[in-house]
Image (cartoon, coloured by chain):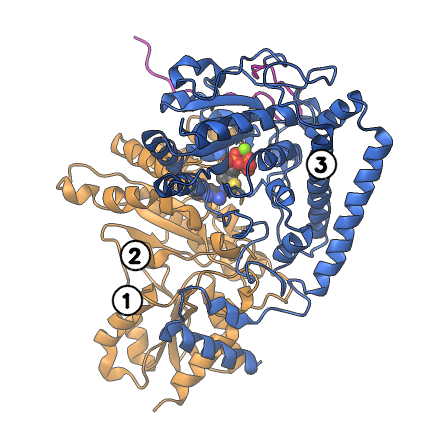
Amino acid sequence: MRPSRLHIPKHHSRPGEKPDFSYLELSPAGTVARPDINTRVRDMNGLAFELVRVIDEQHRAVGPWNPHLDPSDLQVALRHMVLTRAFDERMQRMQRAGKISFYMRSLGEEAVAVAQGMALRPTDMLFPSYRQQGLYVVRGRPVLDLMCQLLSNTRDMCKGRQLPVMYHWRDGNIFSISGNLTTQFPQAVGWAMAAAIKGTDDIAASWIGEGSSAEADFHHAMLFASVYRAPAILNIVNNQWAISTFQGFAGGEHRTFAARGPGFGMAGLRVDGNDFLAVYAVTQWAAERARQGFGPTLIEHVTYRGAAHSTSDDPARYRPKDDYENWPLGDPIERLKGHLIGLGEWSEERHAELAREMDQRVQASWKEATTYGTLTEPPRLDPRLMFEDVFKEMPEHLKKQAAELRAELAGK
Amino acid sequence: MAQMNMIQALNSAMDIMLGRDHSVVVLGEDVGFFGGVFRVTDGLQRKYGEHRVLDTPIAEGGIVAAAIGMGVNGLRPVAEIQFADYIYPAYDQIVSELARLRYRSAGEFFAPVTIRTPCGGGIRGGQTHSQSPEGVFAHVSGLKVVMPSNPYDAKGLLISAIEDDDPVIFFEPKRIYNGPFDGDPNKPAVPWSTHPKGDVPEGHYTVPIGKCEVVRAGADVTVVTYGTMVHVCEAAARAAGIDAEIVDVRTMVPLDVETLVTSVRKTGRCVIVHEATRFGGYGGELSATIQEECFWHLQAPILRVCGWDTPYPHAFEWEYFPGQARVATALRAVMEAA
Ligand SMILES: Cc1ncc(C[n+]2csc(CCOP(=O)(O)OP(=O)(O)O)c2C)c(N)n1
Ligand SMILES: [Mg+2]
């Protein structure tokens, strides 16, 4: 008899090796069928294994998932993605310059947040992770406000209490981002259950990384959503990496993440996350399905984390330097741009102009943001704010501690 | 002897134990190929293989539960929780299972699990990279709880923890991984090579669990503290010109009451300092125990200096952190009383 032996998920390529994405199962654009939104889960299990793609190699939109969007909408989408990237790039540099303490980019994943944000209604509630800044851009929150949060300055929406990128926006229906992974996933389901209890047709959407799908909260979300048929869209952004660990360590080695949908009796869809049109189309499909009471959908977005995990991370230690360049699904901005140019609705010149415009907007916003203070330069928030909002009303022991702090600071 | 920072000392402890004892395994998020986000497990997978140094899925509850199962099956797991702030998904496995397994099975089952986890603030990490939850675990019967304040103790205590048949929650104050920190963020960083406890034997040795250490003898007041705050208190006492006796608790559970009592009976005054929040915190336990044993020797009420009872705020890190000024205020207050 052969003794059992532990299986260790295989990394496809490590530093110094040739990038190898042969493990990825891809479907050609336009080949995946689009079922009606009321289709029973058992009749569309295949969607969890194929890959919905719309933009083909010649930049054309093909197949049943083509959402047939107006070119003007696509131009708006491009604007949002270019702004998101310009914002990310500059904030990364500001962190390097010591102006902010921490940052996380969404490089290469911009289509996920932007397409989904656009496909949902403004009244739908969003429960993002830290890598969907595009949602804020789509819903119209000025980057100035995001910068003020990053700077923990006097206009910081979090009043200095949160690490950079942990935004929230109640009026924009975007939930407070948690540093603790996956907690938002079952909360989104609860929000969706409440929408159904109250009898509204709003839905909830939530995002986690593929690595985060390992947490028990993933299971809670899936089970509650499935049991109660909650009107929710649960997104796994499979960008292949969770800090240094490859998606195989989250269970992606032998099975797609989307396949967990049918496993829970829930629709599961796998989509090319770098294809704006495909992400838009599947989101629209899942949203209609949820809104009309046919239940939740799990969407796996196949994409790539183009940047380091965060400004505290150095990916050269665990993946080939040219991994991203060899990613077979390309760049989401380049692909939508190519499609629009193919339609005769865009040009390289207009694109360069757009990039310049967005960059200038980001720069101007940054200049303004810093006039409201930085972590190290005045004006500063009143430290007493740290004692507020622990409770609705400040209890005696916190009042006492606030007074002690005042005396401590006065003594300096 | 070698010069080591805390990261190297902890790494050396695991290296030695992996080498000496084939039942030792190391597991956690990013600990294998990458060597840990703080590099504490750097090189261990290369040396001992993927079957003894395991990268895990991002599931703290799963990590601890699997460690318990491995422990029951004869292994000696050293699990890393990437930040103490992320230990809560494992809380049920730690409190209901790990802590009570020996008790509920009348000694037939146990799991000799060590859980290492970086704790504490001072790194601009905001509320989810700065917490000090030692009190939450010290409150649970059946867990040993440890927090070293220097490389020498870190290595010796970690070896003791791994060799211990009881579960140990091992907190690593991340602010002092690379050097002692006196609480002043504007001063240039100081490496461990400047500190006597940065001298660490290369081989196997232990620092016993359950023993405090008097790190500075003094006559005026006993300062009971641990972790990063040991260094803050030393600097605060020096600056205030107070002859403080500073006791590094090192082990929250089991507590070395005798060393504390001997010191407080001698000085007649006591200030307790920790970075964790005050209300219901471990300082309350220290204060009550010392009061019970030393009441007739005390010349002033025992004071506590702690983090405020709020989540750890990003922008107000240094207003939150119990720095030298707050410690010195308490030292003066106990000196002026009576
Ligand atoms: C409960 C918890 N455990 C661990 C961490 C530390 N951590 C932060 S991000 C991360 C990796 C997440 O990877 P993934 O879910 O794939 O998202 P991505 O960063 O790729 O977008 C880890 C381990 C955390 N924030 N919370
Ligand atoms: Mg990921």
- Residue A186 position, x and y percent, is 39, 39
Kindly identify which numbered label has been placed on residue A276. Answer: none
Q: Identify the subunit bearing mark 3.
A: A
- The amino acid marked with disc number 2 is Ala
Q: Amino acid at mark 1?
A: Glu
Q: Chain of mark 2?
A: B
Q: Name the residue that disc number 2 marks.
A: B138
Chain letter belonging to callout 1: B
The residue under the point 64% across, 19% down is A54
Residue B127 screen position, x and y as percent: 48, 56
Q: Is residue A11 magenta?
A: yes
Q: Secondary structure at mark 1?
A: helix
Q: Secondary structure at mark 2?
A: helix
Residue at mark 2 to residue at mark 3: CA–CA distance: 55 Å
Extent of the magenta region: A1-26
Mark 2 and mark 1 in contact (Cβ < 8 Å)?
yes
Residue tagged by mark 1?
B285
Q: Residue at x 49, y 16 (%)?
A: A35
Q: Position of residue B138 (x, y in %)?
A: 30, 56
User: Magenta part mainly helix, strand or loop?
Assistant: loop
Q: Is residue B209 visible?
A: no
Left-right relation of A369 to B210: right
